[in-house]
Amino acid sequence: MNADAKAQKKPAQKTLYAQLLARSLFVLAVLLLLIGGFQYFLMRGFLYQNQAETLEAQFRSIPPFLIEEWRSDVKKGYEPAANESDAANALPQRPAPLQSQEGDFYGSGNAADESGYEADEAPDESTPDRREFLLGGLSLAAINPTGEVDDLNAKYGVPAPLLSEEDYNLLREKVLQPGRKVNYVLASDIDGTEQLVVLRPAGGLGSGGMPMLQIGIPTGPLTAILWRQLAIFAGLSMLALAGGFTLYRPVLRRSLSPLSRMVETVKVIDAGRLDERFHAEEGQAEIDRLALSFNGMLERLEEAFAAEKESQERMRQFIADASHELRTPLTSIRGFLEVLLRGSRISEEQLRSALRSMHGESERMTKLVEDLLMLVKLDRRPELRLADVSPEKLLRELESHLRMLAGERQILLDMQAGPDIRVSGDPDKLKQVVLNLLGNAVQHTDPKRGKISLAIRLRGERMLIEVSDNGSGIPPELQQKVFERFYRGDESRSRRSGGAGLGLAISLAIAEAHGGTLELCSVPGEGSTFTLVLPLV
């Protein structure tokens, strides 16, 4: 019940295809959003700067005497006539230029200003309506030297926004810089309408300080343009996302098709089909690396299964050989005992011979069991009594025993490597290895003409004990098998003379337990050399 509940609560897994598709669209959406934001601010700056330059040009198109009259009207509280018929009666005479503490309102006091209009030229009768024509929808204000602001176009345009003294000072400094670009500031008027405001010296760019003229325009139309462009870009972005969704799907399916094929291949692979391999040339580096990794894993699994199979086969062969080796002496002993139990009349000499045969078979069986037990111990966990061993001293102690085992064969000892060589090992186990190697050489050499040599050598940080003979040698195809258990190089030899085939296997296990190994170099017809390799202390 709990397992079913957990299975039901487990969230549905997302496919790699769905994740890649979602992430690709998300990245595309983020890029489009960034591009849209960049476009908005870039276009906003361009439109505002362009509008500021337009206002600057519009400044220069207004005759200075008109600005003077408009400001004079504001000072006198004059309101322009409501229609054309009253304009002549309502229009006052143009006053003299206003004076300030710094001089003329326009700074220079010349009869003609930079716009090209004559100062003495009389205004047209329709002067009050020119503001509607020239400044419709705009704001215009004059900033007196005292900081007072006069709104000159509230009737025909929009109220002029009031800037802070800090903004006025900053704009005035920028306006008077040579080679400047048109600077502007955004401010809101009393109605809350945002305006783009530009300042200009009343007497032209050549005059410094106050008074200043301020012209502004509502940013609503510019904002509408920006939002319209953003709406167009958003629509195009949605089309781009839809197009991306449509195009990404077949592209991703095609890109992920090698993975789908790998999944199908994995489904058919089992212990009996480890020879299956993935195609590693799909043209996609990541997929190819994954395929190579899977192929490497399958190769290792195949080798491991093959090694396990071989190990099991060796185990079966080992059990069969061990059973056969034990059955032979037991059969012999049983035969002798049956003869004795039947009560047959035998001589004392025959009895002694039978008893000696049974004793020999029992000793061989005991040796075989001891060797098997030793192999089991070495395979499981070697028990070594390590000590500082001198190879030269070890061979000297074994010399008499070696010559006795060799019989009439010639024994040569080469210890020129010196007595200072030391290895860490179990002296008894190392002696057993040397005796096993010598016994193997004795079995494969002629009793009369045989020659066996033992030499101590150095190879880098390793010590070598070489046991060479002039026997028949071992063929190359059999050299890897001589260290297998129960293997006999010459099957024609009897078990009594050839042993059980465990000596070299035990010697290799002892060498490996000491951190070394056994090496074989053999030339058929010339002899063999077995080398015990051990690390130096």
Image: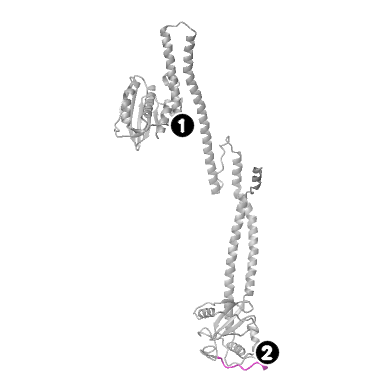
Query: Seen in the image, is 402 located left or right of residue 231?
Result: left
Q: Nearer the viewer, residue 177 or 147?
A: 147
Q: Which residues are magenta?
A: 89-98
Residue ID at (41%, 13%): 356
Q: Indicate whether residue 207 is drawn in magenta.
A: no
**Nearer to the camera, 436 or 442:** 436
The amino acid type of the residue labelled 1 equals Arg
Residue at image position (46%, 31%) is: 380
Image quarter of the C terminus: top left
Q: Secondary structure at mark 1?
A: helix
Asked if residue 93 lies in the magenta stretch, the reply is yes
Tell me if residue 150 comes above or below residue 357 in the rendering.
below
Name which residue lies at 53% across and 46% down: 289
The residue at 57%/75% (across/down) is: 49
Instruction: Point out the image quarter for the N terminus.
Output: top right
Q: Say which mark, if any, is on residue 81.
A: 2
Can the viewer see residue 38? Answer: yes
Do residues under tags 2 and 1 come within 8 Å of each other at their CB atoms? no
Q: Secondary structure at mark 2?
A: loop
Q: Separation of disc 2 and disc 1 at Cα?
A: 120 Å
From the top left corner, tell me how far across and down residue 67 is, in percent.
Answer: 59, 87
What residue sits right under mark 1 in the picture?
Answer: 380
Where, by quadrant of the figure, is residue 447 drawn? top left
Q: Position of residue 262 (x, y in %)?
A: 59, 43
Task: Residue lying at the far front in this picture: please name it.
Answer: 2
Seen in the image, is 400 located left or right of residue 316? left
Task: Tell me: 349 left or right of 342.
Answer: left
Residue 290, percent from left and from top: 54, 45
Which is nearer the N-term, disc 2 or disc 1? Answer: 2
